Amino acid sequence: MTCSTWKPRYFDIGVNFSDSMFQGFYHHSTTRRHPEDIDKVIDRAHLFNVKRMLITASTIKESEEHFQLCEKYPNNFTSTAGVHPCLVAQEFYHNEELADDYQDKLDHLKSVLEIGHAKGYVKAFGEIGLDYDRLHFSSKIQQLTMFKKQLEVVASLKHLKIPLFLHMRAACDDFISILKPFLDDGSIERGNGVIHSFTGTEDELRKLQELGFYFSLNGCSLKTEENLEVAALIPISQLMIETDAPWCEVRKSHASYKYITPYPNKFYPMIEAKKPEEVEEPVQEPAQETQKPMKQKKKSPPPKQQIKLHELLPFPVIKQENFEKHKITTNKLIESHQNPDSIDYATGEFAYPLIKSRNEPVFVGNVAEILCKVHGITEDRAIEEFIDMVYENSCRVFKV
């Protein structure tokens, strides 16, 4: 009998590594709760086969700063470049009117896109689009204007064939009306891109499918039973997956949570723990008759586990304000351990902790499991084909 060597491969196409949570700052606080831990988050993702990640930019500044992240963590991820619809007012407007330097900013964005593409850092243009759920950030007219103008930027670079990373919330008809002319005249390639974090209705799905783009889903895409019904209608050949970390986790209150099973499983294969080093017992010389038998020292029992593990994955989970307390507890456990050299720091109670309510790329396998279940895919071979196809969809579009 031969053993299968198949392992899942995941491409998390939406990670916000420039978010302050990965620097240890939460809820706009200036008090750091823990050190920057992107390296720990990347290592944990790799441990569970997240082979590739795409970090998403929301402003021109972020688009440019992501070059530094790509340089600091080479071969770990690539990036997008573009201005999020909710931030176009902040980026391009002054007192409700287009700022005098808006064209200069668009030219700068174009330059960032060209340079980033040449360096191999930028793999998509975005995230751009429309978001009518949050018009308090940018008005409808501001979003429509800048969506079109940003599409003109990428259309002017048609020869680079850069995919689109698109955002659409409650704006389906306007979204299509802005995009379609670019597709019809060929200045933007039909289907070359993805509508990320899709949360639309069945009717919206049908309309958007005519544009030929892919659809990427995360925890926010899988909140309700209606969401799950729509997700089941997306052909696997059009699917991608993402976490949108540190946001959009799959929560216990979501309709999709019931489909997730705890580690280990097909989506999160067992990680072999570090084996304790064998220690030879010293040879005891026979005691002389005149000597009293030596008393054997009793070994103290291993310390009881004081660290709570995540309900789904083999890592500690803590509140961000308890990071230092957790560190002290862990150090005490290590000091009292019978064989410190045998400690497994990759998984289990001594692993780097997950931060409660902060999403990470390692959770992208949960999205894959949910989508398999809603598509009625349960057999091992079919699951393997599903995961492989979704991974290959992303690699093909983003040319990695």
Image (spheres, rainbow, N blue to C red):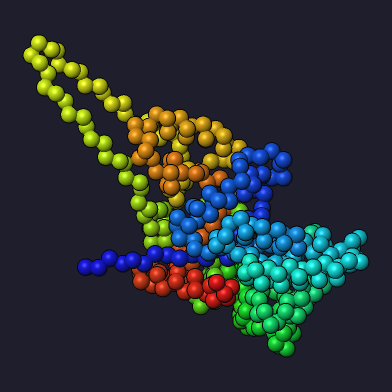
- Quarter of the image for the N terminus: give it: bottom left
- Whether residue 106 is situated above or below residue 50 in the rendered picture: below
Q: Is residue 101 visible?
A: yes
- Quarter of the image for the C terminus: give it: bottom right
Apparent side of residue 288 relative to residue 373 in the rendered image (left or right)? left
Q: Give how far across and how far down residue 280 sits, in percent.
A: 23, 35
Q: Residue furthest top?
A: 290
Q: At 22% across and 32% down in the image, what residue appears?
A: 281
Quadrant in the picture for residue 369:
bottom left
Q: Give how far across and how far down residue 276 sits, in percent.
A: 31, 41
Q: Give how far across and how far down residue 125 sits, in percent.
A: 68, 71
Quadrant in the picture for residue 142:
bottom right
Q: Give how far across and how far down residue 220 sits, in percent.
A: 60, 60
Q: Count how many numbered circles sit on residues in the image.
A: 0
Q: At 57% across and 34% down in the image, what residue appears?
A: 324
Q: Residue furthest bottom?
A: 185
- Whether residue 337 is situated above or below residue 198 in the rendered picture: above
Apparent side of residue 365 relative to residue 90 in the rendered image (left or right)? left
- Whether residue 336 is situated above or below residue 292 in the rendered picture: below
Q: Quick one: 107 or 248, which is closer to the camera?
A: 107
Q: At 42% across and 61% down in the image, what residue appears?
A: 267
